[in-house]
Image: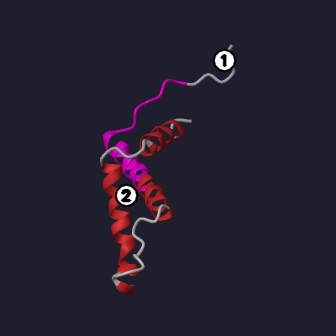
């Protein structure tokens, strides 16, 4: 016996769904950027590095890599976040 009956999920409007997916993809991109940072992506090599300028701008490149990974399908985190936000908006 289901003690917590749920009403059928009502899909969000297309504009709201787009905004929710944008937010979810943004969170996934931030997560991936941090994972790339932890993996050492974008660190200045010890020899023949670009100096302080490279250090300052490497985060921009890492963030862009993460955004591109997310737009290419990512790791599924954005879809899970989107589904969760849609479900929570109907409670």
Whether 83 is drawn above or below 50: the answer is: above
Could you tell me which residue is drawn at 40 percent across and 76 percent down?
44
Between residue 73 and residue 53, name the one nearer to us: 53
Could you tell me which residue is drawn at 47 percent across and 38 percent down?
86
Residue extending farthest top: 1
* Residues shaded magenta: 7-26
Main SS of the magenta part reads helix
- Which residue is denoted by mark 1 in the rendering? 2
Q: Position of residue 32 (x, y in %)?
A: 44, 56
Q: Quadrant of the N terminus?
A: top right
- Which residue is denoted by mark 2 in the rendering? 66
Q: Residues within 10 Å of mark 1 (few under 14, many from 20)?
A: few
Could you tell me which residue is drawn at 46 percent across and 65 percent down?
40
Residue extending farthest front: 47
Q: Position of residue 53 (x, y in %)?
A: 35, 84
Labels 2 and 1: the sequence-earlier one = 1
Q: Position of residue 90 (x, y in %)?
A: 51, 36
């Amino acid at each position: 016996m289901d003690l917590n009956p749920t009403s059928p999920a009502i899909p969000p409007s297309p504009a709201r769904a787009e905004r929710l997916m944008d937010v979810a993809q943004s969170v996934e991109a931030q997560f991936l950027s941090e994972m790339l940072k932890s993996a050492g992506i974008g660190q200045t090599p010890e020899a023949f590095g670009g100096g302080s300028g490279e250090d300052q701008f490497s985060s921009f490149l890492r963030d862009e890599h993460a955004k591109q990974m997310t737009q290419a399908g990512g790791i599924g985190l954005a879809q899970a976040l989107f589904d969760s936000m849609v479900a929570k908006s109907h409670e």
